[in-house]
Amino acid sequence: MYSNSYIFRYASVMVIIVAAILSSAAMFLKPLQEKNEAIDKMKGILASANIKATSGNAIELYKTNITEEIVITNSGEIVEASKSGEVEPGKSLAFNLDLKKELYKKSKNLEFNIPLLVVESNGIKTYIIPLRGTGLWGPIWGNIAVKDNFSTVVGVTFGHKGETPGLGAEIDTKIFQSQFVSKEIFNDGKFQSVKVVKGGIVTLPANMHIHGVDAISGGTITSDAVSEMLANCLENYVPYINKRN
C-alpha cells in the first residue's frame, strides 16, 4: 500500500499539472475568444442599422459600413473620432470602451465617456448608440440606431445573459425588437426616450404612441429594465446633440 504522504504528494503533483494545462489552454484560446466576442459585437452593431452580418463577413462589413467611431464626454465634447477610411474593426477606443465602467462612473456623478458609431450611405448618416443595463437575472445590452435627426429609430438589437426563457428572454427576438422601428426619442425637441409599456401602448395617450412599444407578456421586470437602459444610456447623448444643433 502507498503511504498517506505518497498519496498526498502524488495528488499535489497531479493538481499542479492539470492546473498548468488548463492555464496554458486558457492563454492559448484567449485571443480566439476575444476575436469571437468582437465579431459578435460587430454583428449586433450592424444589425441595429439593418445590416445583416455573419461570423465570416462581420469584420469586412463593419469596415465597409462604419464610417466613424467617436468617443464623447458626458458634457458633449468629442474625445476621439476616426474618419472614413480610418476605421480598423475592433481596435478603436470607441469600440472597446467599457460601457459598464463608464455608466458606473455616471452613477457616482463622475465624468464619463460614451461611444457613438456612424454608418453613412448615399450621404445619409445613421448613428448607432451602444446600450448597457441590468435585467432580472443579470446584464442586458444592445444597440439602437437612429436617423441623422437623432430621434427616429432605425432599428435595435438587445441581448441578455440569463433572462427567463419565454418571458424576459424575448427581448432578443425580432418580434419584440421590430416594434422600435420608427419610434421617436425626442418630443418637440425634448428628450423622451422610448418606453416599454406594460399593457401595451394602447394605454398611452395617442400622441405618446410614437414613444412606446408593447411590453413582453409575463416579462414585466425585464421590460422595465429595457426602458431604464434606454433612458439611462440615451440621455447621455443629449449634450452632444444640443451642441450639434
Image: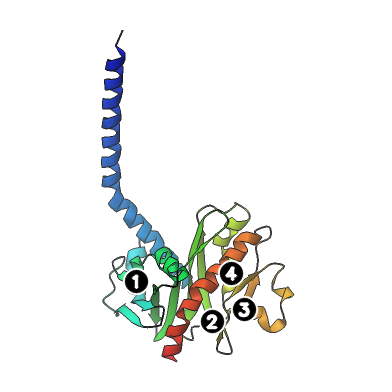
Which label is found at residue 164? none
Q: Position of residue 182 (x, y in %)?
A: 57, 79
Amino acid at dot 3: His
Q: Quadrant of the N terminus?
A: top left
Give the amino acid type for the residue marked by disc 1 in the picture.
Answer: Ala
Q: Residues within 10 Å of mark 3 (few under 14, many from 20)?
A: many
Nearest to N terminus: mark 4 or mark 2: 2
Would you call the spot at circle 4 few (<14 residues within 10 Å), some (14-19), or many (20 or more)? many
Dot 2 surroundings within 10 Å: few (below 14), some, or many (20 or more)?
many
Of the numbered discs 2 and 1, the one sitting upstream in the chain is 1
Amino acid type at circle 4 is Ser
Q: Which residue is mark 1?
A: 94
The label shown at residue 152 is: 2
Say what secondary structure mark 4 lies in. Answer: helix
Task: Compare residues 2 and 20 and report the one nearer the observer.
Answer: 2
**Considering only order in the chain, which callout, 1 or 4, is on the residue closer to the N terminus?**
1
Q: Amino acid at mark 2?
A: Thr
Residue 244 found in image quarter: bottom left
| SS assignment at label 1 | helix
Question: For the residues carrying marks 3 and 4, which lies nearer the camera in this image?
Answer: 4
Mark 3 sits on what residue? 211
Inter-mark Cα distance, 2 to 3: 10 Å
Q: Residues within 10 Å of mark 1 (few under 14, many from 20)?
A: many
Among the two numbered marks 2 and 3 on one chain, the one whose residue lies closer to the N terminus: 2
Q: Tell me whether circle 4 and circle 1 mark residues in contact (CB < 8 Å).
A: no
Give the residue pinned by disc 4.
227
Determine the CA span between mark 4 and mark 1.
24 Å
Q: Residue 23's image quarter?
A: top left
Q: Nearer the viewer, mark 4 or mark 2?
A: 4
